[in-house]
Image: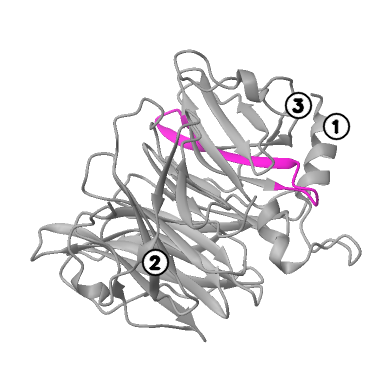
Amino acid sequence: MTAAAALVLVAALLVAGPPSAAAAPPAQDVEATTGAVQAASQGGTWLELASGRRVELALPAGAWLAAAGTVGESGDGWIAAAVAPAGRGTEIVLLAGRAGRGADPDAAHGTDGAAGRAADAAEPAASLPPPPGRSAALRLEPLPLIEAGRLAGLVWLDGADRRSLAVRYAPWSGMGWGEPRLISPPGPGSQLALSAARLDDGSWLLAWSAFDGHDDEIVWSLGREGSWSAPRRVAADNDVPDITPAVVAADGGALLAWSRLDAAAGAYRVVTARFRNGRWGEPQVVGPAGSVFPSFEPASPGLLPVVSSNHSVVRLDAQAPRPGPARLLYVTSRPNGWEVLELDAAGRPSRVATFVAGGESGEAGRPVLAPGRDPSAALRYPLTGGERAASWRPAPATSGDRREARPQP
């Protein structure tokens, strides 16, 4: 692809600002244009879009995918953010393109279970430049901010080493990057696991894990029109690690989930908190002992979330506001065990489905929640195409006292 053609493609797919009134999708459909599932196999790294189409990514040698999402008014465009070796450090790699007709469903998987390549090629991907002003060896965890199907900006981590990372943001104008802005300077230790959601008032809620000199805490910042608030703790300081946050827009605010060490149990548990009117409610324990790596899953058929990958751990982030209950997926202490917890608008658990591995070869990688399967829940494994179902049951009445998850007979 020539430089001129690449610029036309980038401008068409990623131009910032709201679409015209005639083309603007209703609020409940915004999620459909901001989601993709990523998966990696021995054959490479690919995106699976909400339409079911698959796009194989041509990443540089040694690069790993950090985040991906769909863009464009019809959702046929995509953007992928990766991290690649660069000298003695790392640099952000950004690719954008349009999907083709997608993979042949009958040829999507080989006999060895590995994901197949797209049946026909899409337009060649355009390479976007990374944000300017690189001043440190490492740039990590690039996370595109997608607003109404358009790229609005990028947040990422940078620093001299992994214990001195800052959080930065750069706006995207439609034709290039604005000057990077500092959200959080380097602290006494690591800052990791960026997660973002666009709230229904148009602001951005960013959450991450930051070491305070004793343990990790979950912190947050609110972004509006390119300005970000000073980072603050989500909850009162404590003496145990709080890690791997995931945030999702909810009616009138947001829900946040993360894992907190339960010192008495000697294991992590998933915790949630509700954001409303600029404040966080009290955290509540919703996961059993051994529950980690939470992600919010789509509640409506046909909608897939944005996916982030922190090295080998895949975390899914749903950025756009959407109606309906929030569904939280997390790992349990059982081998290849998963649990899906449904939360109401206030963040209270309503029902839960527990999945226990059966040893099937189709259960590889992190699953996603298959939509439209009530009265049961089903997990789908994008890497292999395997599925597993489980019945919903009422969530425990007191979430703070949950025991180890037990599957329903």
Q: How is the image coloured?
A: one colour
Dominant secondary structure, magenta: strand
Q: Amino acid at mark 3?
A: Ala
Q: Nearer the viewer, mark 2 or mark 1?
A: 2
Q: Is residue 293 magenta?
A: no
Going by the picture, which residue comes out furthest to the right?
22
Name the secondary structure under disc 2.
strand
Tell me the element at label 1.
Answer: helix
Q: Is residue 338 visible?
A: yes
Q: Out of 3 and 274, give the one closest to the viewer.
A: 274
Residue 210 in percent (x, y) is at 32, 61
Between label 2 and label 3, give the one nearer the viewer.
2
Q: CA distance from mark 2 to mark 1?
A: 52 Å
Where is residue 26? Give x, y as percent: 77, 66
Q: Say which residue label 3 marks.
A: 122
Amino acid at pointer 1: Ala
- The stretch of residues the image draws in magenta is 71-91
Residue at the image point whose x is 48% and y is 50% from the top: 316
Give the quadrant of the N terminus: top right
Q: Earlier in the sequence, mark 2 or mark 3?
A: 3
Residue at left offset 37%, top offset 62%: 352
First along the sequence among labels 3 and 1? 1
Q: Name the image quarter holding residue 95.
A: top right
Rendered location of residue 42, percent (x, y)? 45, 18
Q: Is residue 313 above or below residue 298?
A: above
Query: In the image, what residue type sits under mark 2?
Result: Arg
| Residue assigned mark 2 | 351
Residue at the farthest top position: 111
Secondary structure of the residue carrying tag 3 is loop
From the image, tell me which residue sits under label 1.
Answer: 4
Is residue 187 at least partly visible in the picture?
no
